[in-house]
Amino acid sequence: MDSRIILLVEDNPKDEMLTLRSLKKCHVANQVVVVRDGAEALDYLFASGDYAERDLNDMPTVILLDIKLPKIDGLEVLRRLRADERYQLLPIVILTSSDEERDILAGYELGANSYVRKPVAFADFSRAVADLGRYWLLTNEPPPVRKG
């Protein structure tokens, strides 16, 4: 199994299932960690709460982040991550159903690397997720790990 982790932050079970199925279908063998709200995402990434025992050196290669989340919305998650030096270079892709201009602008202003609107049709959704997986895990060269 590839050691590069994908963190999927998604509260919709159907979208979670479609994303996981699409990644598997395009032969992305990476571990996918799924968290279902913004608070859980922050707990995972900062090794707190239920994830207090998680090794902070085992960082995701990419985060697929929905912005319409319970507890803490995805834009606030993005804001908090970019405020922390450890997460300033981590690729974060907003994967959401929102096509509102203010969300797109806010996502980029807060440091998202990409903003992808979830297609409605299953085949289009599957293709978009497969393209994301291939790009961020195979094509993209991740930033070097900061020593410190």
Image: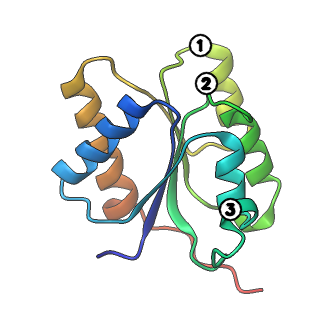
What kind of element bears circle 3? helix
Q: Are marks 2 and 1 in contact (CB under 8 Å)?
A: yes
Residue at the extreme right of the image, as rendered: 83
Mark nearest the camera among 2 and 3 is 3
From the top left corner, tell me how far across and down residue 133 is, in percent.
Answer: 33, 52
* Along the viewing direction, whichever of 139 and 58 lies nearer the viewer: 58
Relative to 88, 7 lies left or right: left
According to the image, label 3 marks what residue?
50
According to the image, label 1 marks what residue?
100
Residue at the extreme front of the image, as rendered: 50
- Earlier in the chain: of badge 2 and badge 3, it is 3
Q: Dot 1: few (<14), some (14–19), or many (≥20) neighbours within 10 Å?
A: few
From the top left corner, tell me how far across and down residue 134 is, in percent.
Answer: 29, 54
Residue at horizontal 63 percent and vertical 79 percent from the top: 55
Image quarter in which the N terminus is found: bottom left
Q: Which amino acid does label 3 sit on?
A: Asp
In the rendered image, is residue 125 in sight? yes
Q: What residue type is labelled 2?
A: Ile
Residue at horizontal 24 percent and vertical 35 percent from the top: 126
According to the image, label 2 marks what residue?
104
Q: Is residue 148 above or below residue 105?
A: below
In the rendered image, is residue 88 in sight? no
